[in-house]
Amino acid sequence: MSKLLIASNNQGKLLEIKALLGDMDVELLTPVQLHINIEVDEVGKTYAENAALKGRAFARASGLLTLADDTGLEVDALNGLPGLRSARFAPQSDATDADRRAYLLARLQGMPRPWLARFRCTVAIVAPSGKARFTEGVCEGEITPQERGRHGFGYDPIFMISGLNRTMAELSMDEKNRLSHRARAVRAARPILEDLLSSDPSIK
């Protein structure tokens, strides 16, 4: 069976991607399973650049076709912040997801609502050669001042999806994997994966 490395140690992200790709004829692997422990400096100026940096590092380390992503929350009232810095937005170096949510809400205090925002995800499919192909997914919504829901991770409890009146954290896994930015990007990547896995014996 062909193998695909998911270049992430984020358990929430791994669960989502595995659910989205679990019906494909491919063995989904994680860095932990392959004993790969590398840190990638996300110094790119775009989501695609960061996804490619991660994908190439893990593809090189594993010799496997690799799926990597970079995701950000863009808040209009903050001129697109936290954006590329979403995972490192809070000032403290050891910030938790809760710390980052609290810091974001503190930055928005006093600004008129609605606090329009979107999640944006870019997926990179990277071959061991380093060649990368990209897909993107976007989910529009707004930031809500009260956390709601117990599912998801990151900014999900304060991100209310447009037209739904529910936060990302109030969705079941099945619902999230129909509506989320990452789901849209990963679904768009499936034809690329199927094509590569069926046509290129060097990545099997």
Image (tube, helix red, strand yellow):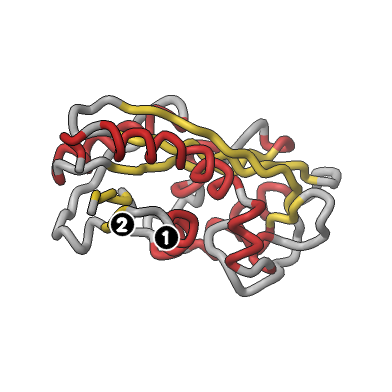
Which residue matches tag 1? 22
Residue 151, how many percent across, how many down? 59, 70
Residue 157, how many percent across, how many down? 65, 64
Q: Is residue 172 left or right of residue 129?
A: right
Farthest residue, direction front:
198
169 vs 74, nearest the viewer: 169
94 vs 40, nearest the viewer: 40
Q: Is residue 59 left or right of residue 104?
A: left
On the image, which quarter does residue 194 sit in? Answer: top left
On the image, which quarter does residue 70 sit in? Answer: top left
When the figure is inspected, residue 12 is found, relative to residue 143, above or below; the finding is: below
Q: Amino acid at mark 1?
A: Gly
At a point 69% along the width and 68% down the height, the residue shown is: 170
Q: Are marks 1 and 2 in contact (CB under 8 Å)?
A: yes
Rounded to the nearest angstrom, the CA distance separating label 1 from label 2 is 8 Å
At a point 61% along the width and 65% down the height, the residue shown is: 174
Residue 95 at least partly seen? no
* Rendered image: mark on residue 28: 2
Label 2: element kind: strand
